[in-house]
Amino acid sequence: MDRLIRGERSKLMGKIRGRDTKIERALYDQLTKMGLEYQVRDIEGKPDYAHREAKVAVFIDGCFFHVCPEHCSIPKTNTGFWLKKFIRNSNRDLLVNAKLMASGWKVVRVWGHTVKKEPERALEIIGTIIKARMLIINIIGRVPAGGIDYL
Ligand SMILES: [Zn+2]
């Protein structure tokens, strides 16, 4: 990467970004079609997507900042800074999960690598969760218990 001259590097980054933007756009289209709102400010933790009726909150967690066990490695420079940041981020995520679950929300945390590699699988699972919860709501007349899934 360091050997690439500036122009080549920005071209390469543009390609990577372009691909990610396409996936994110498709995800947005599908999730909003399923009735989820995007970037929900008034719900605990400001989920990336939320389905209010089914009480499903979806977070798209980047592998680096949210400390994915498969892809996050501690940088070799400024290690102390990054460790503190990772701990802070993890604690915040756990607190958000706990608060949402305590008020009956189903939390779905989708790793960045899942969004990139298996977006269809993530969409299918989220769709199933929403359908199942809506079915239960129709049968018992109230929102079922909260919980959490990592995809
Ligand atoms: Zn990952």
Image: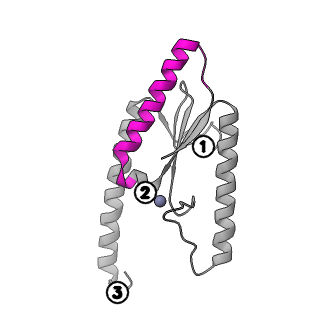
Label 3: element kind: loop
Label 2: element kind: helix
Label 1 crowding class (10 Å Cα cut-off): few <14, some 14-19, many 20+?
some
Q: Identify the residue under disc 3.
A: 3
Q: Is residue 117 left or right of residue 79?
A: left
Alpha carbon distance from label 1 to label 2: 21 Å
- Of badges 3 and 2, the one in the foreground is 2
Residue 138 located within the stretch drawn in magenta = yes
The colour scheme applied to this rendered structure is one colour
Displayed quadrant of residue 96: top right
Q: Residue at x 63, y 79 (%)?
A: 78
Q: Identify the residue under disc 2.
A: 113
Displayed quadrant of residue 57: top right
Q: Quadrant of the N terminus?
A: bottom left
Alpha carbon distance from label 3 to label 1: 40 Å
Mark 2 or mark 3, which is nearer the start of the sequence?
A: 3
Q: Which residues are magenta?
A: 116-144
Magenta: predominant secondary structure element?
Answer: helix
Mark 2 or mark 1, which is nearer the start of the sequence?
A: 1
Please state the horizontal and vertical placement of residue 69, each as a whole percent of the image.
54, 61
Please state the horizontal and vertical placement of residue 99, each as a whole percent of the image.
70, 39
Give the residue type that dot 1 points to. Lys
Please state the horizontal and vertical placement of residue 16, each as a whole percent of the image.
33, 64
Indicate if the residue with disc 1 has its beta carbon within 8 Å of ligand 1: no
Q: Which mark is residue 46?
A: 1
Is 117 placed above or below 141 here? below
Give the residue type that dot 2 points to. His
Mark 1 or mark 3, which is nearer the start of the sequence?
A: 3
Indicate if the residue with disc 2 has its beta carbon within 8 Å of ligand 1: yes
Q: Which mark is residue 148?
A: none
Label 1: element kind: loop
